Image (tube, grey):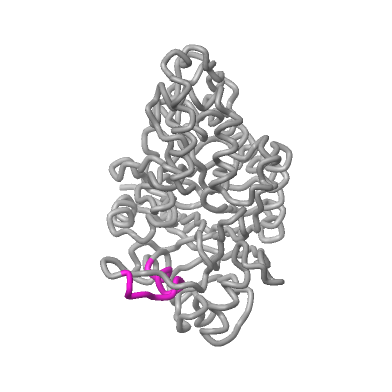
Amino acid sequence: MTVPTPQAPRHVRAVAVQPHWSARDFTTPDAFRRWMRAQLEMARPHLRPGGVNLVVLTELNGLPLVLRGGGWALRLRTFERVALALFLARLPRALPVLLRERVSPIRALQLADIDANTELYLRTCRELARESGVYLCCGSAPMPRYARQGTVLRRAPGVLTNQTVLLDPQGNLIGVTDKVHLTPDEEAGGVDLTPGDLNELRVFPTPAGDLGVAISLDAFRADVIGSLAAQGCTVLLQPDANGAPWTSQEGLPPDPARVRDQPVAWLESSWQVTAQRQIPYAVNPMVVGNLLDLTFDGQSAITGPAEQAPSLRSYVLTDPRPGFLALAPWVTEGTPDELRQAGLDRAAHSGHPLENEYREDTLHADLTLPPATRPAPPRTPHEDALDALLRGEARAPRPGTWRAALPALPLLALPLLALALLRRRP
């Protein structure tokens, strides 16, 4: 009888990048490529030469591509005004989408150029994964659902989910995950995205770990974490874009008068997941910076078994605790009142000298993982389509024209469309 040889554990270097973004980073393809490349350059000193490296980028780092070609509109200073201006300027492309697919103006604005933006996003990420030789969690971006028809991709009408794409060091597609639980700013009153399906969540076995993705709010939800844990996830990836001052307070439903500090709430995501040993490790990068009138701030972290943490530490406004393998410091120290004021000083349109002064950072931690035993899940038609796009075997659909839609639109509807967009808060 042959006794199987035990497989050695895997050693992986996980890197979380905390970049500082601005609206100008998204107004041209070259600006976007520079911003994304800068993040991989931030990660480079943290990579283990000759080892397996996993780099995780932040949530919604493709959302502002809606600004591509719209640098002229940034002087309007708020996302609501900029979105209205861009919708009107792009009416020949956005209007047919709005009428044909029966979506809101803000979703139509995004879908009007989504094929070109998706291709720019994916090809940029593929190039960076190949150049750096890393497993890359691209962050996340609003993307449609595609199916391949020969050499052309067909987009599912009206669908626009918050998607994370995983690539291997050769730039090949590993898999795609949709965000299941949307925040109010992502729902119909905001950028109007489509929620993902809990039943479609999968774990992707790779040399960098059995990877499961819980985008931002999903990492707080027991149904998502339970599904990934049951499928054998060993490394949870939590790309994040927290749209508020980090030291502000949030209301607790169902009574909004009850409040708690945001860092206290954040302990209920990836740190809690690893502290309760539901999943061994978690990587949570967070983007910072003011995007027009929107504020993004946080502390990126990598968490894991308490016995592997070098010291007791935690987010600001919380008590030190075990389990943080790596943690980005916040921009300053002080009393709770001083910290809360410091967050407000840096927020968008504060007028304070420290407005938009946030901390860029890069973290890494070494993870010890069990040997992979799970087979890769079957690919979805959408993943097959994206893979064909990346390999150059298929192309995204070309934009349509608006002439066919004009007879269906009385001219009096134009002011109503503008009003509808104004009443939506991107």
Quadrant of the rendered image containing residue 49 = bottom right
Q: Say if residue 255 shows up in the picture.
A: yes
Please name the residue shown 57% across and 72% down the image: 344
Q: Say if residue 210 shows up in the picture.
A: no
Quadrant of the rendered image containing residue 84 = top right
Question: Relative to 353, is 232 on the left or the right?
Answer: left
Vertical side of 399 occupied by 214: above or below:
below
Quadrant of the rendered image containing residue 120 = top right
User: Where is residue 309 drawn, in percent x and y?
Assistant: 50, 76
Question: Relative to 355, is 380 on the left or the right?
Answer: left
Please name the residue shown 56% across and 71% down the image: 327
User: Where is residue 156 drawn, in percent x and y?
Assistant: 40, 26
Viewer-nearest residue: 268 or 67: 67
Vertical side of 219 occupied by 128: above or below:
above
Of all residues shown, which one is farthest toward the bottom?
Answer: 335
Q: Magenta span covers which residues?
A: 256-268
Viewer-nearest residue: 58 or 351: 351
Q: Is residue 210 magenta?
A: no
Viewer-nearest residue: 200 or 243: 243
Viewer-nearest residue: 412 or 49: 412
- Total numbered labels: 0
Of all residues shown, which one is farthest toward the front?
Answer: 412
User: Where is residue 3 drawn, in percent x and y?
Assistant: 35, 51
User: Where is residue 125 drawn, in percent x and y?
Assistant: 61, 40
Vertical side of 167 occupied by 97: above or below:
above
Vertical side of 124 occupied by 371: above or below:
below
